[in-house]
Image (cartoon, rainbow, N blue to C red):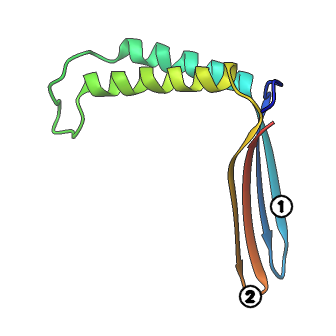
Amino acid sequence: MSNRRAFLIWISVSIVSGRSFRFVLPIPLLLLLGVSDFLEDAAFFVPSSNRILGGGKISPGSVKRILIASAGFLREIALRTEPFELADIDVSDGNRRFAVRCLLK
């Protein structure tokens, strides 16, 4: 186990066939803190009632709880994360290959 903090979510998508393609997207974990703050602010404007409005399928109170839980989850990832592999998917079909890798670095 590492005692080093992770600073990035590193997403890499690779498609190998007749025309190869590779896409890499590093996302700073500090960006998740901003998204977390935004979700908490958005939850402030959602009413806390548990009755379903306008024929919807979910109540505003449930939406508020989901926003607050999501904000807490993103904050925990951003502040208390060590490097590890989130997903590693590699699929081959004949001469075509599709690979997705998502790491916390």
73 to 12, vertically: above or below? above
Residue 42: quarter of image:
top left
Check disc 2 and report the residue beneath it: 94
Q: Earlier in the sequence, mark 2 or mark 1?
A: 1
The dot on residue 3 is none
Question: Where does the N terminus fall, quadrant-wise?
Answer: top right
Query: Label 1 neighbourhood size at 10 Å, few (<14), some (14-19), many (20+)?
Result: few
Which residue is the extreme one toward the front?
1
Check disc 1 and report the residue beneath it: 22
Q: Residue at x 17, y 30 (%)?
A: 53
Give amino acid for label 1: Arg
Horizontal placement of 90 versus 26: left or right?
left
Horizontal placement of 88 versus 21: left or right?
left
Question: Where does the C terminus fall, quadrant-wise?
Answer: top right
List x then y, in percent, for residue 101: 74, 54
Q: Residue at x 77, y 35 (%)?
A: 83
List x then y, in percent, for residue 26: 80, 39
Q: Nearer the viewer, residue 5 or 7?
A: 5
15 to 72, vertically: above or below? below
List x then y, in percent, for residue 49: 20, 18
